Image: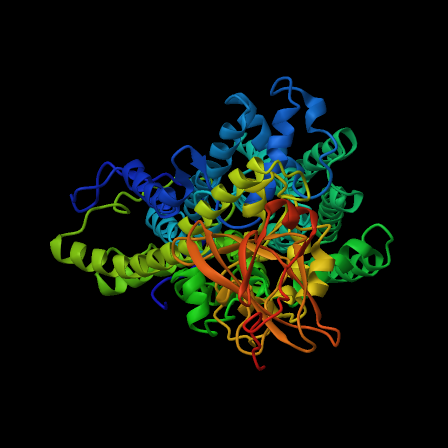
Amino acid sequence: MTSISLSDMNRDPDAETDTSRSLAGERVLPEWLVVGAGLSMVALVRLLPFPNVFRGEDVILTGNDPWAYRTLVESITARLASPFSVDAYSNIGSGEPLLVAVLGFIAALFGGGDAAVGVILAVYPPVSAVVSGVVVYAIGKRVSGDARVAIAGLALFAVVPGHALRTGLGFADHHAFDYLWLTLTFYGLIGAVTTPEGDRRRWWFSALLGLSVAAQTLAWEAGPLLLVPLAVAIAVAGPVLLRDDCLSRLVPVVTGLAAATGLTLLGHLGLGWQSTATAATPLALFFGAIALYAAASIVRQYGRRSLTLLLLEVVGVVAIAFVVTRSTLFAGALDAGFDRLFVSTTIAETTALGGGFGPVLGPIIMLGFAGAIGLPVVVWTLWQSYRQPSIGWLLLDVYVCYFLMLALVQRRFVGELAPFVAVVGGYGLVWILTQIADLQPLPVERQPLTSDRRRRSASSLAVPDRRRFLATGALSLTFVAFPAVNAAALHSRVRVRPSMYRAANWLGAYADQQRLAWPENYVFSRWGDNRFYNYLVNGHARSYRFARENYLRFLLASEPGEWYERLDDRVGFVVVDYLSSDLHAASMYERLFETYGSRTGRVDGVEHYRAIYVGDTGRPKVYQLVQGATLTGVATARQTIELTTRVSIPGASFTYERRIEADEDGNFEVVVPYSGRYEVGETTVRVPESAIDAGETVTVDYWRRGPGGFRTTDR
């Protein structure tokens, strides 16, 4: 990158681009048209799950957490007299109160029924992504001053698989909401510190910063984690602004943080949103920004250099860290946050960026080529900044480095990293195109931070000749197509399979027909599917904790009786789906998924688990917990008796078989979960449904005098 100077990156951010003509007389594309195409790409990649989300009249969200938000929003709209009934939004508590309130408000505007809630939740993530795309473009143009960089960054952003997954149609958790406020926070900051004094737009940026910081804090209980790079960026901006004698540009930042503090406290004290520690974060940022401005002013007054301010900042950070870690207000929240960040779980989103795919393929699968192209630009700009700091790129690099570190710990933060790494990746992509396709190079003239001169770059969107157009298109398609395919694959991994959807619908109708009340209609399933099943069957989708803590242990267990006692008062149905792992024959998984609870080999059958439904692909298999009927009779001492019955349920027909040994007096008894006609040796007995439900005893007239009265089976 020796042909490009960092001084170009420090050009006037308010420079205009004239797209109506070019220096060489080439055709020039309207900028709005190219940006519109980029935003269309953002939307298209995120609308790929459409057939899996909108199924007839039903809206089937993807993933696990969205079903909890659907339940919360429905509870809000159910008690709203009007969309503007403030009381209904109060006391949502910690978690994601602003998200729930905003979605509830929008749903109420469209009627407030469950159908409206489902549509709003399904649609909001891609809408958020498109708006974020606009902000990504604006950030790219303001930082680089080149429309080509901004558009290239938008194109890379559109196909970041990790971001596309969490902003895809139907993936209605808090991430898409957080991404929007995160990008707006950075845009407000960069606008405030790069807009010259006297330009009234800096106060618009200040207001945007204040609103975004408050929303970020109230949107997610871990929102302060996303505000850490803001604090670092403000600290980095201080010495640079001092160097260029532009300290007044910190004033809009301080003002914005003051507004953020007021808005956050209004939500916390007035509506009961978020914990005190979380709500106090903007206040801490506000005091920190005031301290920075005061220190910088003192340093300037005494004629000191930026290095002096930097040393004071280091001392201040150490002092703040000492106070915060010993504060009763923040220490507990910090400990809980670190525990959640570095905890090791089987949840895919909490694994490292390279987890499962390797250190090279993993980042490409989750980030596309934005990281591969953008990270060298970050290294280069940081090195150039050592010689001549450029505030726009420095602050952008702060955000990239911070969220890259978080993503290396947990891949869920790829979405937060995506907008910023896409912008630096856009610069790298344009540089590559200038080298390979012989496009007009990026300008290298110096524009100081204090300059207010407006500059025109008429050739930035000029249409190249045919040869260069083909080379540019082929190369750009290479960087875009592969991540788009990965994004589609990730969408398919979180979708609700058609067989699951049909099973949940059938089970919901069955529970209603049986008039089962909570918790008799609770569905015990894999934790990742638990909220989906329970929402459709019983409407209780707030938590999957019980399933997460117990379901896998249940499948691995070999004591069906003990687990029945444990689940009896808590579980109504058990859903067993395919597992790729080979488990021992006595495990509950093998007994329920492979043999329908019947005996096989040396493994006895199960007693209280009645199969009621099997998907048309052989999965999932649904069981209902029942008391079961007890069959008793008299045979010869130590005789082995076989019991069989033919069972037909939706999706399957099978023979349920048990084998029991009589005691020393010839008495035997066995609990069976199915009603119907049983063959017990050469005798038959009919078990009524009432006996299964009530746990009644049914006597088998097994003993008969005379030859052939019973059959003895050697074990």
Q: Which residue is farthest left?
A: 466
**Is any atom of residue 10 visible in this view?**
no
For this view, does 415 lie left or right of residue 561? left
State the image coordinates of residue 84 (x, y, percent, origin top left).
63, 19
Choose between 196 and 72: the one closer to the eye: 72
State the image coordinates of residue 323 (x, y, percent, origin top left).
84, 57
Choose between 383 and 691: the one closer to the eye: 691
State the image coordinates of residue 701 (x, y, percent, origin top left).
63, 60
Q: Which residue is farthest front?
A: 706
Q: Which colour scheme is used?
A: rainbow
Position of the C terminus, as image quadrant, is bottom right
Choose between 441 and 299: the one closer to the eye: 441
For this view, does 531 lie left or right of residue 255? left
Choose between 647 and 22: the one closer to the eye: 647
Position of the N terminus, as image quadrant, is bottom left
**Is any atom of residue 330 visible in this view?**
yes
For this view, does 519 lie left or right of residue 26? right
Q: Which residue is farthest bottom?
A: 714
Q: Residue at x 48, y 41 (%)?
A: 505
**Number of marks in the rendered image:** 0
Q: Which residue is drawn at 40% across and 60% down?
A: 370
Q: Quadrant of residue 82?
A: top right
State the image coordinates of residue 714 (x, y, percent, origin top left).
57, 82
Q: Quadrant of residue 96?
A: top right
